[in-house]
Amino acid sequence: MTISPSVDVNLFVYNAADTISETLDCILTQSWPNLRLTVIDNASTDDTPAIVARTTDHRIRLIRNRINIGPVLNCQRAFWHGTSDFVMPKTGDDLLAPDFIAEIMETLLQNPETAMCHAAGLIFDDDRSVRAAYPPTHSLDATSPDPVARARHVMAHYTSAPAFWGIYRRAGIERLAPLAYRPGWDHAVLAELALYGEIRALDATLFWRRHGGKNVADLARGCSQFTQRNLPLDDALADLFWHIPLTATAYGHIERFAVARIDPAERRALMQSVPPIFRARWLPMMRQEAAHFRAALPDLLDRLAAEHGVVAPWAGRQIADALNALSALVPEADFSPERSAVEALSTRLISA
């Protein structure tokens, strides 16, 4: 008798009482016979933990964070938790067709070189009415034998869910750098993963996303480590990538490729390929971000000037990091004078 491989389904949730029962049901009724479901609760303040605790299925386990660690770190736990060869991180509100796991696992088992497989999806509302189907362009099919070509394919084509919410081969996940507090971190994660294996898509519509995606600006603010730790974004010590979400998304690929587990020459070549790929996709919007950031700079420099000692260069670094991203992706905006001004001001203030 053949035993089906186990899948670790790791559900990361926060205050999901309105949707958690339906989500648990769609996982526990999957046709795939061998799965383990772990709910990683991010210190919810509603009935989410109690609802999970009342579920008697022996395959389910509840882990409660003692404090709210933020969604990025909680998602990281969902990627890493468990010991099965296959892992499926999942949110607490999206739903799956009954054969979601079975059909994806069939593809993964037939294609051992595949690091992740996902399915086509649709957007639904709370009354279960279908709002829209994701177009085929929202799926990824990075199956070239060349790892660098696969990563470039992801950079050129990745848009949003449902491509991120598939089943991952743990051997690929374990090679990834940790998730970053950056806008568009999911883009960069998939691009790095493509270096370690294929990414495949099923044509079948098996992933059902509640309400669809959020506004890009809101997502960018939510990805800041300051937001994740309930600290104010107007603090001079906060990162500023949320001001430039698309530019920061592209720059995040450069940061991640710098530590990718590939040949050094390929790593450098891949970093060099980031700007032309994303300029081809988003240049008008990145130019707008550059203009908006330039307009915000006087206020940011005033905040920097109010700091002193070792705090000053740290605050200056936040401005410099954003300017480095803009200079890499939108060099024609020419922030050279502003970068020099930040460096000079930081140097003066450290001795004040």
Image (tube, rainbow, N blue to C red):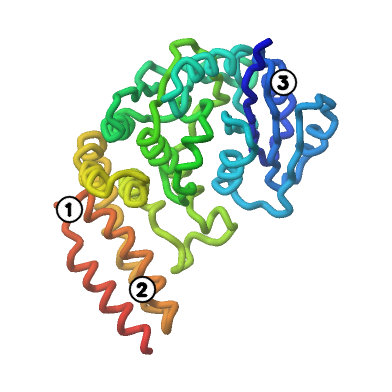
The mark that comes first in sequence, 3 or 2, is 3
Tag 1 residue: 331
- Most extreme residue toward the left is 332
Q: Would you name the residue on which mark 3 appears?
A: 28
Which residue is nearer to you in this view: 352 or 157? 157
Apparent side of residue 307 relative to residue 18 in the rendered image (left or right): left
Mark with earlier residue (1, 3): 3
Q: CA distance from mark 3 to mark 2?
A: 55 Å
Residue at left offset 35%, top offset 83%:
349
Residue at 51%, 30% in the rendered image:
169
Mark 1–mark 3 distance (CA, rounded to whole Å)? 51 Å
Q: Quadrant of residue 318?
A: bottom left
Query: What residue type is disc 1 on?
Result: Pro
Q: Residue furthest front?
A: 1
Crowd class of label 2 (few under 14; some 14 to 19; many from 20; radius 10 Å): few
In the foreground, 135 or 191 = 191
Q: Position of residue 335 (x, y in %)?
A: 20, 61
Question: Residue 27 placed where, x, y %?
Answer: 68, 22
- Observer-side mark, 1 or 3, equals 3
Res 86 visible:
yes
Q: Residue 284 appears in which quarter of the rendering?
A: top left
Q: Is residue 73 above or below residue 313?
A: above
